[in-house]
Image (cartoon, rainbow, N blue to C red):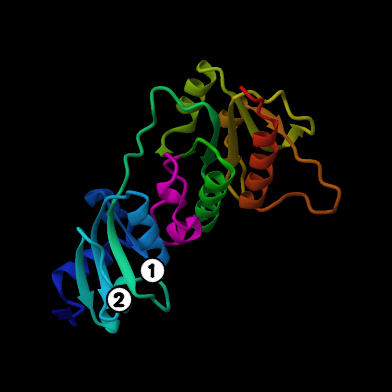
Amino acid sequence: MIITSRSNERVKSARALQDAKARRETGLHLIEGDKLVSDAVASGARVKTVFAKESAKGFDGIETIFVSDGVMDAIASAKTPQNLCAVVETPDTACPEVYPEGLVVVLDRLQDPGNVGTIIRTADALGASGVLLSPDSADPFSPKALRAAMGSTYHLPIYIGIPGGELSRLIAQDFTCICGHLKGSETLPSITRRTALVIGSEGQGVSEETAAQCTLYRMPMRGRAESLNAAVFAALMMQTILNAIPEE
């Protein structure tokens, strides 16, 4: 059976997950695209339902609903949807009592979902131990952030919590907290096996409360640009810090 009506209740429920309120209320999110769905399944994400075009194949043990091209267009946010979409249970984002050793990347009021997803992908690629987002950052489980993360959302812990309290917890656990800041030093502090890197919002940087808990660092700029895109700065800083973390 192929669903051809955009008014179908299952279709409407899936499409609603494009909205942040629906994601919060249901604890579910929507992923789009053949590779992202396949990666989510392979990563052990809790995929509840796959929506597939008639020509696509489903996955063993996962409910698959076949839909027409027009219905897939209605479910997906992409202008040219691929063959698959899926409804996935959102992982637990509660902050841990004890943070994992390594590099924890903290996003403070980062508004652009593309930047959020790119930073998560970079953190995964470079070997960070987790990403912590403030509640007023872009939703890491929004369609745009998930597309930018390219499956990395399911590869490392994603936490959501108030930066002030969580930075205090990190400091109490012997983490060195570093944030990019225009008033910072151009010399990095000593890097340890417990380091938190804080990235502030694209327009305003980190909050004053957050800055007060961190060592402020200004990346040397040899050209005339005063700053970098948040995701680019995060990538450069992650690489620098992870290369400097001492071996056990």
Q: Which quarter of the picture shows residue 217?
A: top right
Q: Is residue 154 magenta?
A: yes
Name the kind of residue labelled 1 in the image.
Asp
| Residue at the outermost front position | 60
For residue 171, say whether it is visible: yes
The label shown at residue 34 is 1
Name the spot of residue 130 as percent of width and height, x first. 48, 37
The one nearer the camera, 25 or 243, is 243
| Residue 107 versus residue 114 in the image, above or below | above
Quick check: marks 2 and 1 in contact, CB under 8 Å? yes
Q: Residue at x 32, y 44 (%)?
A: 91
Q: Disc 2 to disc 1, how far (Cα)? A: 9 Å
The one nearer the camera, 242 or 110, is 242
As helix, strand or loop, the secondary structure at mark 1 comes to helix
Image quadrant occupied by the C terminus: top right
Image quadrant occupied by the N terminus: bottom left
Name the kind of residue labelled 2 in the image.
Ala
Q: Residue at x 79, y 30 (%)?
A: 187
Q: Is residue 230 left or right of residue 134?
A: right
Q: Residue at x 27, y 67 (%)?
A: 15
Q: Residue at x 55, y 54 (%)?
A: 118
The one nearer the camera, 210 or 173, is 173
The label shown at residue 56 is 2
Q: Is residue 193 magenta?
A: no
Q: Which quarter of the picture shows residue 36?
A: bottom left
Name the spot of residue 7 as percent of width and height, x first. 17, 76
Q: Which quarter of the picture shows residue 185?
A: top right
Name the spot of residue 78 as percent of width and height, x first. 41, 72
Q: Sequence order check: which comes first, mark 2 or mark 1?
A: 1
| Residue 11 versus residue 119 in the image, above or below | below
Q: Which residues are magenta?
A: 134-157
